[in-house]
């Protein structure tokens, strides 16, 4: 590449928006080209000024500031002074260069960066939820906890629990199987310093995974998942937890503030006092509701697309009965009809998750005396419909699954029936069912996909879930 002289102007133009960056110039061959870039909902707008004679220009783009590996996206005439990159992905930072030709050779402007602002459609939460079923969980991945993180490194614990790292191929496979949304549980505290500043490298990895979902055409939802148990809903821990939750969501929301409305934020996960599975006390309910309010207030305060982003709050321990008793009153919000409620469902536990249980049959026909058969499931989802959905508040069934029990049921008939029935019972009452895939396509596990390739390991199970949400 020819040598160039590059300089960056110090000040932005007075009329620049927050998404426009300083004009950046480069000189050579008796000419100077100064480039600026700004993002909008239609793309990234590039404009440049030229002094001297230029015979041709080429527009280059990359996702980092290193010229190595950049890609040419346009070839234009020498008198052209602008270009719109309509292929830019919303929410992603891009660096641009103008390579210009003079009688003495080819030279480069300085780099200019911008972010395309995603489009926030005029959709209510109910309308958006209608595009999300069925959903799938990237479980035991970005929320995995392991070794101590070394600040500034990219040595994360994503694979600490034995799953292959998430790839574009995996998300493409999820979409091809018929799923329409993905829940991405995320751990943050293990990647934060003593002042709760999140590692930029970890934020970049989470952004990369969110973009996999966007590229595949999936609605994505990220959260603050279980992360060492610091979200304890007690008065004694309330101030500390509120402060950390607000600081984390300020950083997360600012990072994703330009992403479009196919990205949802979910405030927490299964908040409860560790080890206490009794009905929550008034204190526990009050503090947990406060976590939901801190989340909503914090995200809205970051502005941009977050002023209207669809947000998901959780029932106490994501339990259906406790959501009805603790969380009937939702957080206040500055925008109407952009809030959803989340609960989880794993009943009966001895059938769905307890690998040591001999309970491998489910339903009135196979186990008529068993607990939590079809009428119970119907009644639970009906509670959510009446309390929330009928009042315009969509409900996300953020997790549900039944493990494989091949020692009893080689064909997986009982597992498929439970998954089919629960999906259908939730979906027909307006809930968005999001299957918990823990990544392991083995016995006593709930994985559906080969995480390394994106291929389905259990197409029969996947099919009953997808078809039940039609």
Image (cartoon, rainbow, N blue to C red):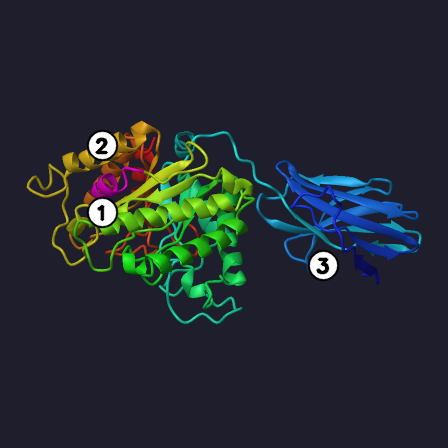
Residue 43 x, y percent position in the rendering: 65, 39
The quadrant of the rendering that contains the C terminus is: top left
The local secondary structure at tag 1 comes to: loop
The local secondary structure at tag 3 comes to: loop
Q: In this orientation, which residue lies closer to the viewer: 321 or 400?
A: 321
Decide if residue 365 is in sight here.
yes
Q: Residue 134, relative to residue 22: is it above or below?
A: above
Residue ID for mark 2: 382
Q: Main secondary structure of the magenta part?
A: helix
Q: Residues within 10 Å of mark 1 (few under 14, many from 20)?
A: some
Q: Residue 355, relative to residue 85: is it above or below?
A: below
Residue ID for mark 3: 67
Residue at 78% from the left image edge and 40% from the top image edge: 82
Measure how far apart labels 1 and 2 are at the Cα level.
16 Å
Asked whether the beta carbons under mark 1 and mark 3 sit within 8 Å of each other, the answer is: no
Measure how far apart labels 1 and 3 are at the Cα level.
51 Å
Furthest-top residue in this view: 390
Q: Residue 277, relative to residue 415: is it above or below?
A: below
Residue 429 in the figure: left or right of residue 33: left
Q: Earlier in the sequence, mark 1 or mark 2?
A: 1
Q: Earlier in the sequence, mark 3 or mark 2?
A: 3
Tag on residue 156? none
Measure how far apart labels 3 and 2 are at the Cα level.
57 Å
Q: In this orientation, which residue lies closer to the viewer: 26 or 464?
A: 26
Q: Residues within 10 Å of mark 2 (few under 14, many from 20)?
A: some
């Amino acid at each position: 590449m020819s040598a160039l002289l590059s300089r960056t102007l110090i000040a932005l133009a007075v009329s620049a928006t927050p998404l426009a960056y300083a004009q950046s110039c480069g000189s050579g061959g008796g000419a100077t080209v100064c480039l600026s870039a700004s993002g909008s909902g239609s793309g990234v707008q590039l404009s440049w000024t030229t002094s001297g004679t230029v015979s041709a220009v080429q527009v280059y783009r990359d996702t980092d500031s290193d010229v190595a590996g950049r890609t040419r996206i346009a070839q234009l005439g020498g008198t052209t002074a602008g270009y719109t990159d309509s292929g830019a992905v919303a929410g992603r930072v891009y660096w641009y260069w103008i390579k210009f030709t003079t009688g003495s050779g080819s030279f480069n402007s300085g780099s200019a960066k911008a972010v395309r602002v995603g489009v926030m459609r005029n959709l209510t939460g109910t309308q958006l939820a209608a595009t999300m079923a069925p959903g799938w969980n990237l479980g035991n991945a970005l929320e995995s906890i392991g070794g101590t993180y070394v600040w500034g490194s990219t040595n994360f614990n994503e694979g600490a629990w034995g799953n292959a790292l998430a790839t574009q191929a995996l998300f493409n496979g999820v979409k091809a199987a018929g799923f329409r949304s993905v829940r991405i549980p995320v751990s943050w505290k293990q990647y934060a310093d003593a002042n709760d500043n999140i590692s930029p490298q970890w934020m970049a990895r989470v952004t990369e995974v969110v973009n996999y979902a966007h590229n595949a055409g999936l609605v994505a939802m990220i959260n603050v998942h279980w992360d060492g148990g610091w979200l304890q809903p007690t008065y004694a821990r309330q101030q500390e937890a509120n402060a950390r939750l607000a600081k984390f969501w300020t950083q997360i929301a600012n990072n994703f503030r330009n992403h479009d409305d196919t990205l949802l934020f979910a405030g927490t996960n299964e908040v409860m006092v560790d080890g206490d599975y009794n009905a929550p006390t008034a204190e526990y309910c009050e503090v947990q509701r406060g976590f939901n309010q801190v989340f909503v207030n914090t995200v809205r305060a970051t502005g941009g697309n977050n002023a209207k982003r669809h947000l998901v709050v959780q029932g106490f321990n994501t339990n259906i009965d406790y959501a009805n008793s603790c969380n009937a009153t939702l957080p206040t919000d500055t925008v109407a009809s952009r809030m959803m409620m989340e609960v989880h469902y794993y009943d009966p536990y001895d059938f769905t998750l307890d690998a040591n249980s001999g309970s491998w049959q489910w339903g009135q026909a196979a186990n008529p005396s068993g607990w939590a058969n079809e009428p119970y499931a119907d009644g639970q989802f009906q509670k959510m419909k009446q309390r929330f959905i009928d009042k315009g508040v969509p409900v996300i069934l953020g997790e549900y699954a039944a493990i494989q029990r091949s020692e009893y049921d080689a064909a997986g008939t009982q597992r498929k029936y439970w998954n089919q029935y629960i999906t259908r019972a939730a979906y027909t009452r307006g809930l968005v069912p999001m299957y918990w895939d823990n990544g392991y396509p083995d016995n006593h596990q709930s994985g559906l996909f080969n995480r390394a390739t994106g291929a389905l390991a259990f197409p029969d199970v996947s099919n009953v879930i997808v078809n039940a949400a039609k």
